[in-house]
Image (cartoon, rainbow, N blue to C red):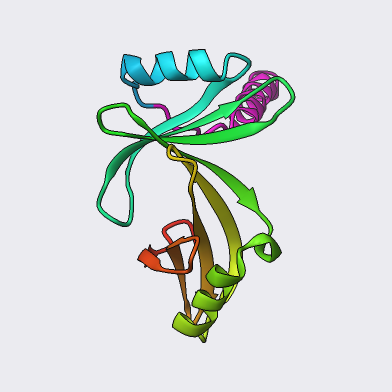
Amino acid sequence: MKKTFLPFVALLAGLAMLTSCNGDDDTMVELPQIIEDYIASNYPAYSIDESEEETLCDGTAVYEVELEDDNDNEIELTFDSEGSFLFSETEISTESLPDAVSSSIASNYANYSIEEAERQDLFDDTNRYQVEIKGDGSELEVLLEADGTVICEEEDSDG
């Protein structure tokens, strides 16, 4: 009994190790050809790491695509449902937020603190900012114009 039990345990341990090493929960959806062409033309050194369909807090249906190069540099791109490029997203320090955005958060969300910030570089060379804020027992994602105008907010589903 011992002789047949040990190989079985070893097999289970090996399978468990393979499963834990492959803890890649990256999401992949099929992208329209126009998006694949855009990425190939504009980001030839990058490969698609994740892709998913999402709805922005303003109700816009989008494709979100995370790219990665051989040096582990990441870029996040967002496209509308027709495949047109909308914006790229870059994580920034909370101290890098424009004063107008920080002031807007302070006045509109007085009981919240900024946890994370991202700058969205739009197709028209303007910027917006998405901030994750925490307070009052909840976490919110707030999207703001560079002048501090709140576009929309939603409960942070990742928090």
Q: What range of the chain is rendered magenta?
A: 1-28
- Identity of the residue drawn at 44% across and 81% down: 108
Total numbered labels placed on residues in the image: 0
- Identity of the residue drawn at 52% across and 64% down: 132
Question: Who is closer to the viewer here, 48 or 14?
Answer: 48
Picture quarter containing residue 124? top left
On whether residue 136 falls in the magenta region, the answer is no
Give residue 19's position: percent from left, percent from top.
58, 29
- Identity of the residue drawn at 60% across and 19% down: 46
Give residue 12's position: percent from left, percent from top.
61, 27
Picture quarter containing residue 72? top right
- Whether residue 46 sits left or right of residue 105 in the image: it is right
Using the image, determine if residue 101 lies above or below residue 37: below
- Whether residue 144 sits left or right of residue 84 in the image: it is right
- Identity of the residue drawn at 31% across and 26% down: 83
By secondary structure, the bulk of the magenta-drawn segment is best described as helix
Looking at the rendered image, the quarter that the N terminus falls into is: top right
On whether residue 26 falls in the magenta region, the answer is yes
Using the image, determine if residue 74 lies above or below residue 116: above
Give residue 41's position: percent from left, percent from top.
50, 13
Question: Who is closer to the viewer here, 50 or 148?
Answer: 148
Give residue 150's position: percent from left, percent from top.
39, 68
- Whether residue 42 sits left or right of residue 59 in the image: it is right
Picture quarter containing residue 153? bottom left
